[in-house]
Image: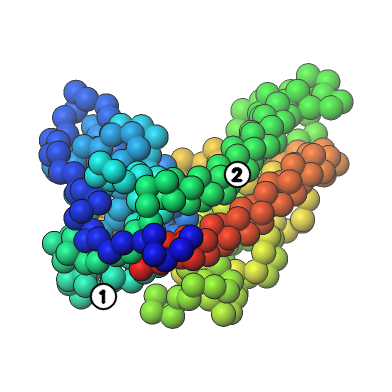
Amino acid sequence: MNSDDRQLKKLNKFAELIIQPYQPSSDENINYIGLEHIEQQTLRLNGIGNSSDVISQKHKFRAGDILFGKLRPYFRKVVRPSFDGVCSTDIWVVRAKPGFDQSFLFYFLANKSFIDECNSSSSGTRMPRADWNHLSETLWELPTLPEQKRIAEILSALDDKIELNRQTNVTLEAIAQAIFKEWFVDFNYPGATGELVDSPLGPIPKGWESNKLNEIASISSGKFYKRNEIMDTGYPVLGANGTIGFSESYNLDNEAILTGRVGTLGNLQLIKHKAWVTDNVLIIKPKEDFFYHYIYFFMQSIEFINLNRGSTQPLITKTDILNQPIIKPPDSLVKLFNEFSRSLFNLIFENNEENDLLTQCRDLLIDKLIPR
């Protein structure tokens, strides 16, 4: 596109901050999005809350609105939900003004130049917040409306493929989980005779054992990582909620299961690549490789909230997890399950790797196609 087609405009000429107050009520169940539900850098949600679980005033949004996390804007928490709901007051609700494309605006607000401007003009030291009053007066180069639509179509196509891969992964993991339940919960496994014996965990197939997790797994903690040393590229830095940035070094270089130790509890991650695991995370490794996926699905049944020992914030200990009672089937059956599940998870990891490349490509295009 010829640069002559671009024109300088203040942000407030093409973007509008929407403020529609909402007071939560226990009688209403509305989709709620807080900062904790928006992933850093990825432009997607990691979950959805409920308005009945929050107390203070929130803001309404409608499907297609852009939600921008103004607290610590360098986290680049930007999403565009496909549903109506309410959100934290630390999240801006933004809409394109008439004559400008909403999808283009979404990617515009996620481009590096805009994020950098948010950071440089934010107020507060420990809890910096982007300043809409300042940003609304900043000048930006904008293409014509038809060009905005073409740019948005290109970037949306990449996001559509990323989402398709994610949905495929959900299906693949659901298949593995269904096999786990059929064999190890309902006891309809290959060669099952139906003969059960009593155990501390209730009736189990004859020849199976009732044990504790420490019999088949070990647990260690991650290591502290300074937030001011987090980079834009390198090895993933993993916190309790997932990737929080990147590092030039790593402290994990083989398969492991991760779960939050402090803050977020019960979020399980399967890792098979090099990464830096922070001290907010516990690293679970099987004593025998073939127990890897069995332990992962078993841990999904743990009520982590019941293990909470924290007062000011949630906290679990290695000992409490290792003491969790577990059924130990014969090794031969676990190995067979591992073969099935590993083939499925190999496809999942391939899709994740493709998504990493697609995300990098999308972000490069965002900064190339939407310069200041």
Q: Position of residue 98 (x, y in %)?
A: 25, 41
Kindly identify which residue carries mark 2.
161
Q: Position of residue 65 (x, y in %)?
A: 31, 41
Which residue does the image show at 82% across and 43% down from the upper left?
A: 339
Q: Is residue 358 left or right of residue 14?
A: right
Which residue does the image show at 20% across and 53% down from the upper left?
A: 13
Q: Position of residue 37 (x, y in %)?
A: 37, 47
The reply to whether discs 2 and 1 touch (Cβ–Cβ < 8 Å) is no
Kindly identify which residue carries mark 1.
120
Within-10-Å neighbours for mark 2: few <14, some 14–19, many 20+:
some
* Of residues 167 and 280, the one drawn nearer to the viewer in this rendering: 167
Q: Secondary structure at mark 2?
A: helix
Q: Can residue 191 be spotted in the picture?
A: yes
* Of residues 251 and 199, the one drawn nearer to the viewer in this rendering: 251
Q: Can residue 129 be spotted in the picture?
A: no
Q: Is residue 293 left or right of residue 59?
A: right
Q: Position of residue 92 (x, y in %)?
A: 24, 51
**Label 2 to label 1: alpha-carbon separation:** 33 Å
